[in-house]
Amino acid sequence: MVRHSIRTLLVGLCTVAAASQAATAVALTVSDDQHKVTSNAAQALHPQTLSDLTTAMKDEAYAYALYNLFGTQADRDGDAAVGRVFPTTAQTALNEHLHEAAMLAGVVGTDAANLRQAIDGETYEHQVMYRDFANQARQDGDTKAADLFTEIAADEGRHRDAFRTALDVASSGRGTIPAPQKANPVAVLAGLPQVRAARTKANLDTAMHGEALAYAKYMLFAEKAKQSGNPALARLWEGTAAIELHEHFAGEAVLDGLVRNTKENLDKAVTEERSEATALYPGFANQAKTVGDIAADRYFNNIAADKTERAAAFQQALNQLR
């Protein structure tokens, strides 16, 4: 009886979310003229609004990655209904919430602009962020994390070099866009953290949010490349995105102990959704309204409402499991 009620609840949620995704997918094909409009609109936004939109994109990209892992674990735990709703919710976070924020912020530009943006990000992660994280983890005795951070830093350097070559090809019209590296997917099983220092845990959280956002942005850039008639560049974006999500994010998630049993995962999802619904996004909305960024105000309020509904649905599923 309990299983039946959970199934009824979550199948209904999946149906609604799937309809939302289908409607959103149409909006993901954006013309060059629309890119110019959104870019100009983004330039007119208050700097704090742009910062809040970036935070929203990181959180929604992270939710996409996290809920897909939770869905896989629910399947392992024999909770098939919950296993369906987690990835469905993940798709909404990516295809609706993140994509709308990206449009408001003018994230996607020309192929050349997208490559320059990625080169800057990969250079920072290669030369600064991951090297610092590795040094700090080694100082704190978290050698597994230090080794992983060092490995990822090297990967990010290779990504940067591939993007630089692709930019040269795009600018000159000569040469060949590199093929992407092949991802080595990491299985993320339920487990406890494999690091001990609070600083390492915080750095893992920062890294996972960054890797999730890189995945989402590179998939958007891939769509732009396809629209531009550049399938080789699209393949480079997609292949690199797969490494960021299935290798880097996943490896960090293992060390973080990100995934637990389905009951604990639902409890975490409820807590996260409630916090964002009651504090994070209303705060962003108030800030946007104060500075006159009306479209962003509406966006943040809409997400807060979605997350209130999500928290209630996850809570009901959690209650059914107890």
Image: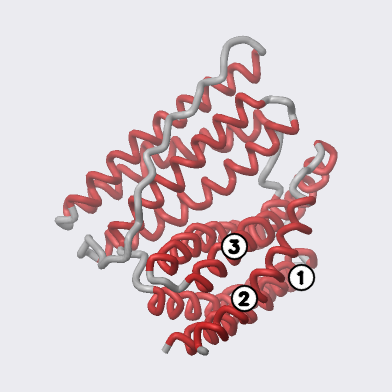
- Disc 2 is placed on an element classified as helix
Q: Residue furthest top?
A: 174
Q: Circle 1 sits on which residue?
A: 298
Q: Amino acid at mark 3?
A: Ala
Going from N to C along the chain, the mark reached first, 1 or 3, is 3
Q: In the image, what residue type sits under mark 2?
A: Lys
Q: Identify the residue position indicated by label 3 in the image.
A: 56
**Image position of 39 with respect to 308: above or below:** above
Binning the other alpha carbons within 10 Å of mark 2 as few (below 14), some (14 to 19) or many (20 upward) gives many
Residue drawn at x 50%, y 80% is 270
- Asked if 205 appears above or below 316 in the picture, the reply is above
Kindly identify which numbered label has been placed on residue 89: none
Q: Quadrant of residue 77?
A: bottom left
Q: Nearer the viewer, residue 81 or 319?
A: 81
- Residue 307, disc: 2
Give 295 or 22, whichever is nearer the viewer. Answer: 22
Please give the name of the residue rendered at 49% of the width and 40% of the height, measured from the top-left corner: 121
- The colour mode here is secondary structure
Q: Say if residue 51 shows up in the picture.
A: no
Percent coordinates x, y for residue 138 in the rendering: 18, 50
Asked if one can make out residue 8 in the rendered structure from this viewpoint, the answer is yes
Q: Position of residue 199 (x, y in %)?
A: 28, 62
